[in-house]
Amino acid sequence: MNNRLCVVLDDERWPENIAGAADAVFDAAIGYLQKNKLGEKIGFFKPVVVNLCLSNNQNVRKLNAEFRGLDKPTNVLSFANIDDEEFVSDLKTAKEAEIGDIIIALETLQEETKQKNIALEHHFAHLLVHGILHLFGYDHQNDDEAEEMEQIEIEILKQLNINNPYEEQ
């Protein structure tokens, strides 16, 4: 299947190696979800497309205020197309399943890596996996949902040789 990650660089300060890392993370996440049949409602019978924007705090803050009512930056935002009422009907005739958009804020990512004393690439991978899972309908609004989502994140990151982000390092 020709799954695609479409990366847009919205801030030139992003390290060059992140785009390559994004492809590997995307492949691992989508591969895991497909292998475990965790995304069938999305239409895994078709290639999956995810849009990733490597942005900054200023732009993420605007989006967070507009769509979530929170006037502050955050590390990652996901906009899932499954939330659109027409997604399922459009999927029937589409050649691929464009499942949504992920936006990651550079400064917040950098700040969190310093606070947690972890590699930028590892935290980026975690945020991208987290965003992808949101696009597939996973959430963490209650303890059971959070536990399920975290376990999937841990399994995907393990395939990338990244330690469990929920354990103290």
Image: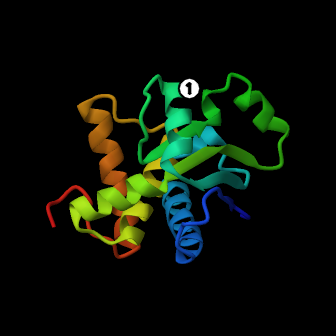
Residue 37 in view here: no
Q: Quadrant of residue 139?
A: top left
In the picture, measured across the screen, residue 159 lies left or right of residue 49, that is: left
Where does the N terminus fall, quadrant-wise? bottom right
Q: Quadrant of residue 127?
A: bottom left
Task: Answer above or below: position of 66 versus 10.
Answer: above
Point 32% across, 35% down: residue: 145
- Total numbered labels placed on residues in the image: 1
Say which of 36 and 112 sits in front: 112
Residue 143 in view here: yes
Residue lying at the far left in this picture: please name it.
168
Where does the C terminus fall, quadrant-wise? bottom left
Q: Which residue, given by chain and number where applicable, does mark 1 sit on?
A: 66
Say which of 114 and 157 sits in front: 114
Q: Amino acid at mark 1?
A: Glu
Residue 128, image x, y percentages: 48, 56
Task: Answer above or below: position of 30 versus 99.
Answer: below
In the picture, measured across the screen, residue 116 lies left or right of residue 152, that is: left
Q: How is the image coloured?
A: rainbow
Residue 30, image x, y percentages: 55, 59
Point 48% across, 47% down: residue: 57
Point 70% across, 61% down: residue: 4
In the picture, measured across the screen, residue 163 lies left or right of residue 27, that is: left
Point 31% across, 56% down: residue: 112
Residue 73, image x, y percentages: 43, 40
Task: Answer above or below: position of 98 versus 65.
Answer: below
Assign a secondary structure to mark 1.
helix
Label 1 Cα crowd, 10 Å radius (few <14 / some 14-19 / many 20+): few
Residue 51, image x, y percentages: 66, 52
